[in-house]
Image: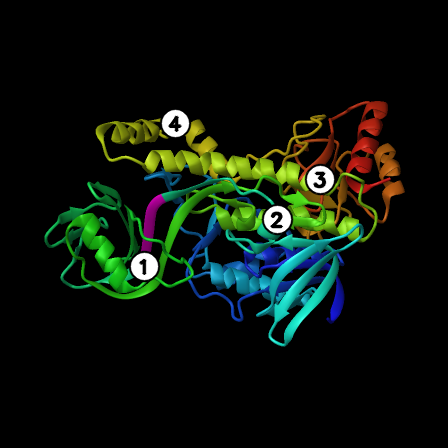
């Protein structure tokens, strides 16, 4: 059987897989992407990006591509949360930013970037077996021209909730499937439906339906206004359904109409749709994100019981993993660097599960007790600190990786400070385009720069001034998280010892 060799095998060409391939290519690693489907998926799934991943894309210089491809670059800062809404319109600055762009378009743009950076993408190639050895992992692949083998240093399963890689690696995926089925559409309404100025609609046989969530004895109906001029509305039904569906199979207007009828007890005359999708919620997390030379990322590692977080979480998995794999391929990774992927991203997945499980609890039940729970929750969100805290949790911007806490910034995502350098004014985002470790000296600490110089060229050194500097110096990982920060006016001996320890821990001897 024919055998080929590559650095890293990425199984799955969805958002997590293509983000990983691009990040690996940026770090000088040659990835091979294997996707069992012959063509990119057409089922409409996630409808946008939001939260921390937008900062990551800006740090890589990819955000302008996404904005250009988006029909509504900055949607109104109102986000569904478990049958109610998080409304940030009253705040000067929203803790969550979003980009309205279909998942299929995100995949397309990420694939273009990955190929530009040297990735090879093979569609119609299915991984059917995996064999791990002391220095390599071998994947057996069925391709259009027959079976073959691929040998690599590492393999990453980004192949979705029904991951074949996870199954082959023997990784447990405990959790549950929720009984409710959600059907979503963006569609024009017929002239027989009266659309009021405030976005409500009047439906013959039912009456007036408010924007937001309408709870009935048989389910939940969600309504939102997309385009008042064209009478385009957002509809979603949620109901318990014992039938099993393949969510890769497109939702039909007939199926949607029948669900509306069951939930409302009335028909809504609908025109041509611009989006149709169906999904069921699952609440699962892989027991391990790594077994030997095999890793999991994206939906293969976690499934969340609410919308709006899965694609973003999966892409940030890939950003965390890519630079660590690249360090191992280039033979400078510390011994336990790859283990930090599971430690950090299992923790991040747990945070995402925390808020999505809370959403699942809020949206369940139509009795007075459930309504009271939602009312009290909404009342709490009238306090700005509570609203901002919830926004940061949903956005993932409150994430701080566990580890040595020598400084309040350690483990957090670096703020995009405005920097004054000898070459002009710039921001941290511009420094991060190459996805390399960066030591940023903000207080002209020659003693610290001298230490970091021993790690050159592995770690870039930059000096700058900034208003209200948060630290004397910051050591930034390629994924944008802070590995070390020096307290302002900290003594040289203390700062030097902590800095050497951080450099060794993350970037080798």
Give the percent coordinates (x, y) of residue 143.
62, 71
Q: Is residue 343 above or below residue 196?
A: above
Q: Please say if the residues under marks 1 and 3 sit with CB atoms less than 8 Å apart.
A: no
Residue plotted at (78% across, 24% down): 490
Q: Is residue 331 above or below residue 232?
A: above
Mark nearer the N terminus (4 vs 1): 1
Judge left or right: residue 392 versus residue 443: left
CA gap, disc 4 to disc 1? 32 Å
CA gap, disc 4 to disc 2? 39 Å
Can you see residue 351?
A: yes
- Report which quarter residue 271 is drawn in: bottom left
Give the position of the C terminus as an image quadrant: top right
Residue denoted by label 4: 383
Q: Please say if the residues under marks 4 and 1 sit with CB atoms less than 8 Å apart.
A: no
Q: Which SS does the magenta portion mostly show?
A: strand
For numbered disc 4, what is the local secondary structure? Answer: loop
For numbered disc 3, what is the local secondary structure? Answer: helix
Judge left or right: residue 266 versus residue 464: left
Q: Is residue 416 above or below residue 48?
A: above
Mark nearer the N terminus (4 vs 2): 2
Residue denoted by label 1: 186
Camera-side residue of 441 and 183: 183
CA gap, disc 3 to disc 4? 40 Å
User: Residue pushed farthest bottom?
Assistant: 145
């Amino acid at each position: 059987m024919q055998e080929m060799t590559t650095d890293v095998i990425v199984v799955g060409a969805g958002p997590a897989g293509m983000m990983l391939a691009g990040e690996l290519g940026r770090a000088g690693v040659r990835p091979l992407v294997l996707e069992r489907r012959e063509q990119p998926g057409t089922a409409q799934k996630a409808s946008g990006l939001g939260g921390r991943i937008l900062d990551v894309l800006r740090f890589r210089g990819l955000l302008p591509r996404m904005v250009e491809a988006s029909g509504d670059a900055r949607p109104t800062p109102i986000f569904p949360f478990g049958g109610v809404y998080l409304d940030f319109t009253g705040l000067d600055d929203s803790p969550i930013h979003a980009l309205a762009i279909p998942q299929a378009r995100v995949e397309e743009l990420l694939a273009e970037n990955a190929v530009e950076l040297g990735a090879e993408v093979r569609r119609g190639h299915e991984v059917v077996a995996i064999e791990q050895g002391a220095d390599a992992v071998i994947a057996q692949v069925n391709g259009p021209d027959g079976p073959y083998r691929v040998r690599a240093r590492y393999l990453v399963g980004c192949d979705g909730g029904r991951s074949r890689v996870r199954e082959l690696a023997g990784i447990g995926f405990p959790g549950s499937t929720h009984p409710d089925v959600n059907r979503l559409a963006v569609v024009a309404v017929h002239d027989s439906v009266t659309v009021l100025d405030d976005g409500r609609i009047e439906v013959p046989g039912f009456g007036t339906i408010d924007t937001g969530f309408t709870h009935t004895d048989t389910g939940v109906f969600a309504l939102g206004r997309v385009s008042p001029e064209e009478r385009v509305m957002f509809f979603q039904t949620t109901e318990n359904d014992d039938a099993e569906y393949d969510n890769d199979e497109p939702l039909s207007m007939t199926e949607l109409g029948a669900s509306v009828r069951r939930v409302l007890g009335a028909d809504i005359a609908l025109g041509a749709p611009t989006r149709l999708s169906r999904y069921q919620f699952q609440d699962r997390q892989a027991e391990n994100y790594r077994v030997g030379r095999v890793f999991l990322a994206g939906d293969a590692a976690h499934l969340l019981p609410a919308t709006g977080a899965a694609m973003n979480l999966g892409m940030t998995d890939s950003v965390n993993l890519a630079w660590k794999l690249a360090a191992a391929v280039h033979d400078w990774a510390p011994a336990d660097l790859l283990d930090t992927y599971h430690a950090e991203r299992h923790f991040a997945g747990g945070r995402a599960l925390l808020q999505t499980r809370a959403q699942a609890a809020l949206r369940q039940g139509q009795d007075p007790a459930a309504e009271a729970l939602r009312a009290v929750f909404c009342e709490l969100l009238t306090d700005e600190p509570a609203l901002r805290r919830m926004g940061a949790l949903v956005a993932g911007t409150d994430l701080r990786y566990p580890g040595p806490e020598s400084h309040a910034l350690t483990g957090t995502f670096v703020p995009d400070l405005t920097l004054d350098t000898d070459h002009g004014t710039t921001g941290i985002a511009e420094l991060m385009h190459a996805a390399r470790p960066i030591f940023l000296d903000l207080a002209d600490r020659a003693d610290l720069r001298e230490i970091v110089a021993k790690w050159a060229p592995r770690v870039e050194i930059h000096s700058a001034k900034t208003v209200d500097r948060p630290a004397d110096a910051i050591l930034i990982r390629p994924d944008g998280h802070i590995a070390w920060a020096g307290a302002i006016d900290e003594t040289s001996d203390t700062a030097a010892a902590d800095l050497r320890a951080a450099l060794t821990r993350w970037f080798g001897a």
